[in-house]
Image (cartoon, helix red, strand yellow):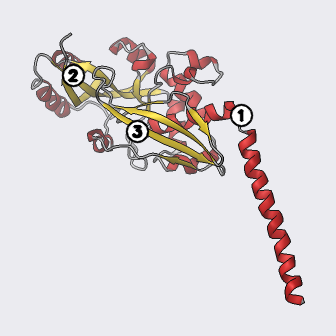
């Protein structure tokens, strides 16, 4: 009799707890408004991009709400994709469970990954690195083009980068916004993508700005201390992201299509520390 009473005391609290848990899950599913879904896609697809300078990652707003998760698929492309459309790497998924934990799909390895760990943007002039880059550029054929990573000798304001390198279109601003950090492994990176935050329902006047730094700062403002655990899964540190947003300077950038002469022209600029070639292709005849 005592055993039954004891088990009864344990049974009903467990039932009530299970009911409460189910109710919270149902409430989570029901109350997630469309604005939250878009914010989830905007925040975490950009987090994946910041952590993955090797690729162009495009969020298209196709967020799905399932019973116990919110999911989004993002396109992962080579930097040369706008020029060579066949070089598409594929699609990866990002998922948030009802406890707020984020899971990220695996990205393919890239030749750029190891190099980024020794990225020297903002580290001063390097005549030896420039000489090596010039020798490599001279090996390109006349009809050959390249995707390059440009390291700046010193951090530059965005307006100066626009003036010196002609990078005024936000969609072309594939910027490194810090030097290399041993703890993070890669410099902080930002590409506004095709429209940046203006491509989704994030209401802020800076969404329409052509300033990559302004859009990066807006994204960082949307991050909170409790996001650190999910950021860490990507090797990102909220403290370093905030520091890069506060400084707001460009340490280097990725660009294409550069011919041999254009790369040599870049290397002749005193603002350039060095140039690294990552992909080459021959432009198809029309």
Q: Secondary structure at mark 3?
A: loop
Q: Quadrant of residue 168?
A: top left
Would you say residue 270 is visible in this rendering? no
Label 3 – label 1 distance at C-alpha: 29 Å
**Quarter holding the C terminus?**
top left
Left or right: residue 219 versus residue 253 is right
Residue 110: image location, x then y, percent? 29, 41
User: Which of the pair 118/168 is nearer the observer?
Assistant: 168
Residue position for label 3: 52
Q: Earlier in the sequence, mark 1 or mark 2?
A: 1
Residue visible at 63% across and 43% down in the picture: 66
Residue position for label 1: 33
Residue visible at 86% across and 83% down in the picture: 6
Residue visible at 55% across and 21% down in the picture: 199
Residue 165: image location, x then y, percent? 33, 15
Label 1 – label 2 distance at C-alpha: 50 Å
In the displayed structure, 159 sits above or below 50; it is above
Residue 134: image location, x then y, percent? 14, 26
Residue visible at 41% across and 46% down in the picture: 106
Residue 138: image location, x then y, percent? 10, 23
Q: Secondary structure at mark 1?
A: loop
């Amino acid at each position: 009799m005592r055993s039954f009473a004891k088990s009864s005391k344990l049974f009903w609290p467990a039932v009530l707890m299970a009911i409460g848990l189910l109710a919270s899950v149902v409430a989570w599913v029901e109350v997630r408004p469309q604005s939250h879904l878009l914010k989830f896609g905007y925040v975490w697809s950009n987090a994946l991009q910041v952590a993955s300078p090797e690729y162009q990652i495009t969020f298209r707003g196709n967020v799905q709400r399932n019973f116990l998760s919110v999911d989004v698929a993002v396109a992962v492309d080579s930097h040369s994709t706008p020029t060579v459309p066949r070089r598409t790497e594929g699609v990866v998924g990002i998922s948030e469970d009802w406890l707020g934990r984020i899971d990220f799909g695996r990205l393919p390895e890239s030749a750029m990954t190891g190099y980024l760990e020794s990225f020297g943007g903002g580290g001063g002039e390097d005549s030896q690195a420039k000489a090596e880059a010039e020798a490599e550029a001279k090996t390109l054929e006349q009809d050959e083009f390249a995707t390059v990573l440009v390291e700046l000798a010193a951090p530059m304001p965005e307006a100066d980068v626009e003036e010196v390198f002609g990078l005024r279109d936000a969609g072309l601003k594939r910027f490194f916004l810090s030097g290399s950090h041993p703890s993070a492994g890669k410099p902080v990176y930002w590409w506004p993508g095709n429209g940046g935050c203006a491509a989704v329902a994030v209401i802020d006047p800076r969404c329409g700005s052509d300033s990559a730094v302004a859009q990066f700062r807006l994204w960082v403002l949307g991050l909170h201390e409790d996001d650190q655990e999910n950021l860490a899964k990507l090797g990102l540190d909220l403290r370093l992201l905030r520091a890069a947003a506060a400084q707001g300077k460009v340490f280097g950038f990725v660009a294409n299509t550069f011919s041999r002469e254009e790369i040599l022209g870049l290397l002749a600029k005193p603002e350039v520390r060095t140039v690294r070639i990552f992909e080459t292709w021959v432009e198809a005849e029309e």
